Amino acid sequence: MEGKSKEKGSLLFKAIEQHTSPPKMTTGLSEGQTEEENKRKLRKASKCYVYENKFNVERLICKRKDGLIQKYLVKWESYSEYECTWEPWFHLPKIILDDFSTPKIEIDPDTLQEISDEFRTAVQARLSQRVGSHFYISSTFDSFRRLFHNRGTEVQKGRKLLQRDDFSGLLLPEDWDIFVYTKLGEGRAVSFPIKVTPTLRWSKNAIE
């Protein structure tokens, strides 16, 4: 996640998921194929697709349009992150797609504690500095969705403005947004709302 704090201002952070190699994508239309032909092909595929093998999905990372087809970036269970692939929606079970859109499964306690500690450390470190405004916190996208689903106000695609209460899902002390740096009680505090931006990053060495 990336963060921004000012003595008088807001805090901005990005939820960043790091990966080592971008998956390959195919084009939505074959050479010489019209959009109508592609629609018919898609309808047929969605009804008649037969799996040669089945693999367990660990989590869906993000989604994007490939031509007319909605695809999801899949982390496969027991497979390396090097082997994440973009899969069309009709390759995936409805229950997994529904959980992506409306998360229902809670974050496991260890992961929640790890994210909470990292976020708290990053906020305190930024408030302790008088120069600079951004910080990054690494988190998986599914954790971000589960923590902030139906929280805050969406201002741009994927970006939200969060109030203090929107962070109640994290395991934070009451004074997590305050940094005191003198014995007289002088310090700095986060000014809400906080701007949150999830960002997917790939290693520079793996760009194809």
Image (cartoon, rainbow, N blue to C red):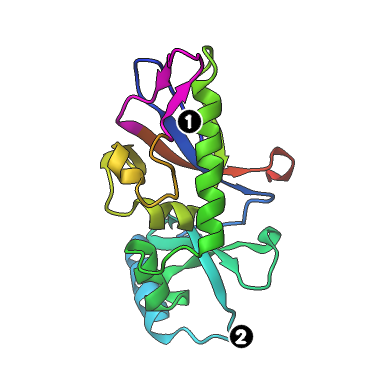
Q: Quadrant of residue 38?
A: bottom left
Could you tell me which secondary element the residue under label 1 belongs to?
loop
Q: Do the residues labelled 2 and 1 touch (CB within 8 Å)?
A: no
- For the image shown, how many numbered marks are present on the structure? 2
Residue at image position (35%, 24%) is 10
The CA distance from mark 2 to mark 1 is 42 Å
The residue segment tinted magenta is: 176-194
Residue 204 drawn at (x, y percent)? 69, 38
Label 2 sits on a secondary structure element that is loop
Q: Determine which quarter of the picture holds residue 159.
A: top left
Q: Position of residue 4 (x, y in %)?
A: 45, 25
Residue bearing the label numbered 1: 3
Q: In this view, does 155 lie to the left or right of 18?
A: left
Residue 189 among those drawn in magenta: yes
| Furthest residue in direction front, as rendered | 183
Mark nearer the viewer, 2 or 1: 1
Residue 203: image location, x then y, percent = 68, 42
Question: Can the viewer see residue 26 in this picture?
Answer: no
Most distant residue in the right direction: 205
Compare residues 207 and 154 and report the one nearer the observer: 154
Residue 178 highlighted magenta (yes or no)? yes
Q: In this view, does 201 lie above or below 7?
A: below
Locate residue 144, reporting x and y percent: 44, 51
x 54%, y 33%: residue: 122
Residue denoted by label 2: 53
